[in-house]
Image (cartoon, rainbow, N blue to C red):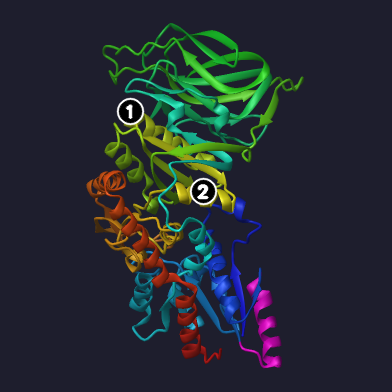
Amino acid sequence: MLFIVYSQVSEEQLNHSLGMPEYSYYFVLRGFLPVLRELGKVILVSDPEQEVDAIYDDCLKRGEECVFLTFSPPNKSATGLHCPTISVLAWEYDRIPETAWDDDPKNDWRNVFKDHGRTITLSQYSADAVRKAMGENFPVEAIPVPVWDAFEAYRIRNKCSWPAVETEITIKGNIVDSRNYHITDDSFELTKSADSFQIQNWCGEALHLGFTQTDEFSAYLGGFYPAEPWGSWSRIDQPWVLFPYKFSGVVHLKISACGYGYNVNKEIFISIGDDKKQILLKGDYNEIIRVSFQLPRPGNMLKFSGLDLSPVPNAPDPRSMGIGLRYIEISGEPSAKSVMVTEQADNAVRNVTLDGVVYTSIFNPTDGRKNWKDIVIAFCTAFQDVHDATLVLKMTNHSLASFLGELHFYFQQLGSFKCRIVALHGFMEAEEYEKLIAATHFYVNASKCEGLCLPLMEYMACCKPAIAPCHTAMADYIDSSSGLVVDSNLEPCILPHERCKVFGAMRYRINWESLANAYRQSYNIVKNKPETYREMAKAASLQIKKFASSIVVKEKLKIFLTKELGCSF
């Protein structure tokens, strides 16, 4: 038996594809490979239209059975092949796209399923969605990624033991730690070096920076509130801006300030590194401020000081505000090329020590389904006065800007909190990933819908109970024995794969109070009910063994392929 397999994202492309559409299908393919290799031979292809049928024809000549498994959504799957084709689908909504647009019939997934004649989904929920569109008799089988066996070595070493009291994690990339900030109702300051993370660009719309020597970029503002699409207002008297590059030499800034009477005719200070300049802020709308700096050493943090936050009488908005910014341009002297630009490496090796009761969540921050806002806000609300509660957010997106501005904004909105938030951004070796698992007490999921959620299954396989809702794909393996179930209710939504923006599908709205209560309950279990925790940990591991072990997955594949294609094993 020969399995031809394909994923749009390869291992070589993975570092640059994290967070991009369909990147997670590579992990699905990788998870299935050990089982497929037990059932037969495996060939990976990069161009299905050119490679698959040629391989299939060779198999026919040898009398060898052959099937093509495309780990990709139907609209990205090859059609019209002679080789029997099965798309392996991760899907999280109650219905599939049924509309063709852009003159591409594959955007109506029913056309692809008709061509293939069968499909494999990762959950019962998505299998039901396929049957709803294709009819009850359409051949579809729900087969999860075989996660259990991949962590056998981990379980042998750790034996579902109590999480480590203190663990040091190493990552090649960036670490954002709330302990490195001084946050009160009136201030937001970075107390440690900005080199603890790299800024590439800011995902918000409030500040646009045009860099004259390279492509346009954005930056993140500390202590600014993005009140309008055209600008940001300061919330503190010493706001700051982090640039994606370090500059040295003669650096010129052109700042568009927004006034409305705030700090009118006020002399304030602006600085980069050790060079500080005094400027006059006229307070006129769109006032252009030009200032130059001589930087003997590289610097990347622009600071403002001396702002007056007193309310302005008769102003359109009487709130206290220091300065408004619309954009900043940075350049050196073009003829002399005196400005030097140093790109901050995003693969620097950095360490962080985790302690206390640790909660972990892994997600792409640009994926709105993951609902990480609720994860953060509910955590800080539940543990506002708790020093030893730590939330670890492992961000699976190549860009730091995909979450940093939003996370900083949550820090400012939440004000003073004693619990700890650590965001990890970058590559973790397998050994370090296992350290993170070992340090974790609960894995947290607050998604509005899931196609499977591999990280949640991995942590459960490693004896980590869950805080998660029991809906969509998670309904296959989440229950009250293996974690704390978060309440959720149906709400209408728009399918991301359809051009027509109508509410044609359903997803789930998390009950925020239920999530916050689950945090509190879980903390109490860890602190005061160790036997209850151990029972939940063992139940979580057993649940994944029953659901997604290699034996279970292999048997389901054999039965499906034998029934639908007449394969023999």
C-alpha distance separating marks 1 and 2: 31 Å
**1 and 2 marks in contact (CB < 8 Å):** no
Seen at 66% across and 82% down, the residue is: 53
Which stretch did the figure color magenta? Answer: 47-65
Q: Residue at x 68, y 29 (%)?
A: 342
Q: Position of residue 34 (x, y in %)?
A: 57, 72
Residue 493 coordinates in the image, percent (x, y): 32, 58
Q: Nearer the viewer, residue 196 or 280?
A: 196
Q: In which quadrant will I find the N terminus?
A: bottom right
Local crowd size for mark 1, using a 10 Å CA cut-off: few (<14), some (14–19), many (≥20): some
Q: Relative to 16, is 154 on the left or the right?
A: left
Please give the residue where the numbered disc 2 appears in the rendered image. Answer: 435
Query: Visible in this render: residue 448?
Result: no
Q: Is residue 34 above or below residue 459?
A: below
Disc 1 marks a residue whose amino acid type is: Gly
Q: Nearer the viewer, residue 558 or 13?
A: 558
Three-letter amino acid code of the residue under disc 2: Lys
Q: Residue 76 magenta-drawn? A: no
Quadrant in the rendering for residue 71:
bottom right
Q: Residue at the spot x=51%, y=81% of the render?
A: 116
- Residue with the mark numbered 1: 415
Residue 60 part of the magenta-drawn span: yes
